[in-house]
Amino acid sequence: MSSAATTAPSGVHDHGRSYKAEAVFYAEIFGLLISLTILTVTLSYVNVGWALDLTGRAPNIVAGMLVAAVKSSLVLWFFMHMNHEGRLNRFIFAFALCLFTLAVVAFSSDFVWLHTYVVEGARAAVGGM
């Protein structure tokens, strides 16, 4: 057997793990993503605000968004191989993420502080809850 058969193909990064160890590692990350998805669905049926002494569904939405942020971070870091990228690519990603966060905060401030949403209309639209 030649040594060329045991080396990684060109363009594939060898990070010190065998292919079997890589497959097990990705299967573990996949299992974690499935577990977090189950947690997200469970959170939709549990009143998170009760534990925090808050009313409404806002705590459930925040909790779901936090779980979604963890899941997207796992996908980005491991499946999209951001952990093997250079400083420039990480900086560009972090800068874009900061701009996105700033835009979400700026756009949602209209709803939070100016109360431009219509609660009664929204309740009527979802069936008078």
Image: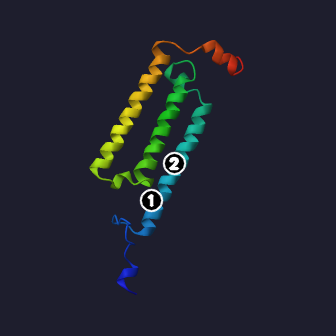
Kind of residue at disc 2:
Leu
Residue found at x 70% / y 17%: 128
Real-space Cα separation, disc 2 to disc 1, in angstroms: 13 Å
Q: Position of residue 73 (x, y in %)?
A: 43, 44
Q: Is residue 77 above or below residue 51?
A: below
Q: Which mark is residue 25?
A: 1
Q: Which mark is residue 33?
A: 2
* Residue at the spot 38% in from the left edge and 72% down from the top edge: 8
Indicate whether 113 appears above or below 72.
above
> In the rendered view of the protein, which quadrant contains the C terminus?
top right
Task: In the displayed orientation, state which residue is furthest to the left.
Answer: 87
> What is the secondary structure assignment of the residue under circle 1?
helix
Q: State the mark number for residue 48.
A: none
The answer to which image quadrant residue 125 occupies is top right
Vertical side of 34 occupied by 52: above or below: above
| Residue 110 x/y as whole percent | 47, 17
